Every structure is written in C-alpha cells, then in structure tokens.
Amino acid sequence: MVGEPRVLWSPSSSVIRDSNILRFVNWLREFYGLNFEVSIDNPRENVKNYDALWRWSVDNLETFWETVWRYFNVTSHTPYTKVLEPAKMPGARWFVGSRLNYAEHVLGLPVG
C-alpha cells in the first residue's frame, strides 16, 4: 500500500519569502493582474499552487515567455516582432526579429 509521500526537504518561511518565484508571482500580480498563490507558512500547499502557475505557462505559452522576457529585462538590440512562430516543435522560432548579445546578459557587460 502506498501512503503519503515522505517530505525530504521543506523550505523555511524566510526562504520562501526571499525566493525568485515569489518575486516573479508578485510581479505578475502587479503588472498583469494575475493572481498565483504562494504560501509563506505552508510549503506543502505550494505544490498545488505551483501547478496553477505551470498550467498557466503551458496554456498561455506566448504570454508566459513574454512576461519572462520583461521580468528579466532582456535587452534586445532589435525588437522582436512575434514571440513564437510557428507554435510547433520542431521548428519553433522564439522572439522573431530580436538580436541579443549573449555575453551582455550572462556576464552583465554592456556591449555596443
């Protein structure tokens, strides 16, 4: 008989409060009016909460990736004209028309 899965690790409230995912979820609420719950006091509840965020990211693929682009303040030397074209794998092209400098983002170096 299979019972409740054993929890191997559970983050503290301070770890959750300082997490990148909480910052992203709060940003989505502020700028897009999206409300994904994150429990500070009950980490196990966040398994279900994370599923809602994941489902939104899958059901709204272009919007999700555009929010990631904006949240991380991606610098493009030419603007993108479309987030995803075509929406199928293989062959998908992301942020069509944009031109990025990898070193500029990874190393934080201004190039240009």
Image: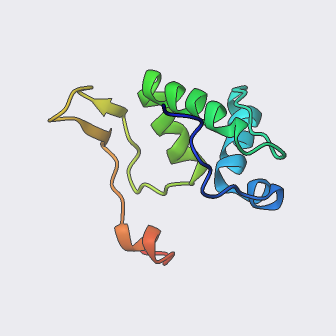
Give how far across and how far down residue 71 sits, in percent.
60, 48
Viewer can see residue 9: yes
Protein image colouring: rainbow
Image point 46% across, 38% down: which residue? 65
Compared with residue 81, is residue 69 higher up or lower down, i.e. above or below? below
Q: Residue at x 84, y 46 (%)?
A: 41
Give residue 89's position: percent from left, percent from top: 19, 32
Instruction: Name the residue furthest front.
Output: 1
**Above or below: residue 36 compared with residue 59:** below
Identify which residue, 91 or 21, lies in the foreground. 21
**Residue 112 appears in view:** no
Q: Quadrant of residue 31?
A: top right
Q: Residue furthest left?
A: 90
Rendering quarter of residue 88 = top left
In this view, the residue in front, 78 or 94, is 94
In this rendering, is residue 4 above or below 35? below
Q: Quadrant of the C terminus?
A: bottom left
The number of numbered badges drawn on the structure is 0
Task: Judge whether 110 appears above or below 36 on screen.
Answer: below
Judge left or right: residue 67 versus residue 101: right
**Residue 74 appears at what percent x and percent y?**
50, 55
Q: How far from the left and from the top, in percent, is residue 70?
A: 56, 45
Q: Residue at x 56, y 54 (%)?
A: 72
Which sits in the foreground, 92 or 37? 37
| Residue that appears at 60% across and 56% down | 8
72 horizontally vs 59: left or right = right
